[in-house]
Image (spheres, helix red, strand yellow):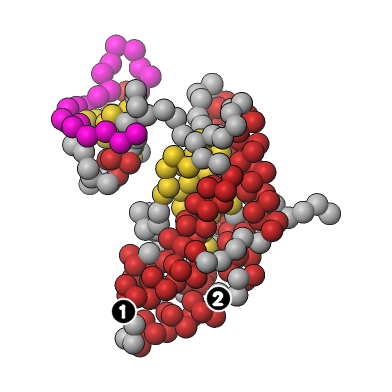
Amino acid sequence: MGAKKFVVRFDEVSSRDGAQVGGKNAALGEMIRALKKQGVRVPDGFATTADAFRLFVRENKIDKKIRAEIERLKKGTKSLGAAGKALRALFLKGKFPQQVEEQIREAYRDLCGRYKKRAVDVAVRSSATAEDLPEASFAGQQETYLNISGEHAVVDACRKCYASLFTDRAINYREERNFDHLKIALSAGVQKMVRADKAGAGVMFSIDTESGFPNVVRISAAWGLGEAIVQGAVNPDEYMIFKPLLGRKDTQPILEKVVGDKKRKVV
């Protein structure tokens, strides 16, 4: 029997793998697999699994400490801010199990080899997963780390992503919905970054987020990294595109276009 896989490449991941790599990484893997077949270049990467997170918790023996901190929060003997800080510290002080760290380092070296670079700059993103909580939405509750370079820095960023499962916002969200904190796991997605100093990026939704209308795509775009848009730090260009007209000749699928001032750029 081979060693258990605690890290998977994005091109090995599909939308069916959300329980192991979270919704964000599962969707990213599905997109990469689909677009590569059509010749669209998408930056490669990999993700740690939910099993890797659970092993980290188990080997560092922090599950009981998590329960104790949450109990203090519930009883009102500790504030949300104090409990969150203590919980994040448990992860930041923890060490990756040897087999998990080795697989993260190996996957990063493989990524560097594919791009023929000694140390590829990557984004390390959090993707929370809860196998038995399909109604849960963890978007925007955990942290993202950009421009990470080098094996040690990548491992450290993955640990910080683990800790961000216990941001104050994430703790409060789960408490309000009576979710068991120890039934939530986290997958860290590591993806090669592209140059943003001479280009733009954005955020795209496949439906109208305000009305729920499914036949449009909404795009917000600005110079540099999309992080400026996510943080609300820039007034971006806005597009609304009508899906049924995409790919048709002699038609104009853009229903609405608003040009923002885009005064700031994050690179």
Q: Which residue is mark 1?
A: 79
Q: Secondary structure at mark 1?
A: loop
Task: Let me know if residue 250 is in the magenta part.
Answer: yes
In magenta stretch: residue 191: no
Could you tell me the amino acid type at mark 2? Asp
Q: Which residues are magenta?
A: 246-267
Residue drawn at x 47%, y 56% as measured from the top left: 161
Looking at the picture, tell me which residue is in the foreground, 64 or 10: 64
Residue 191, position as x, y percentages in the image = 51, 39
Label 2's element? helix
Q: Which residue is found at the position 55% from the left and 74% from the top?
A: 62
Q: Which percent across, then down, holds residue 97?
A: 66, 61
Q: Which mark is residue 63?
A: 2
Quadrant position of the N terminus in the picture: bottom right
Splitting the image into 4 quarters, where does residue 223 fall? top left
Quadrant of image for the C terminus: top left
Does 194 sit left or right of 75 as displayed?
right
| Residue 153 horizontal/vertical position (percent) | 53, 47
Does residue 8 appear in this view? no
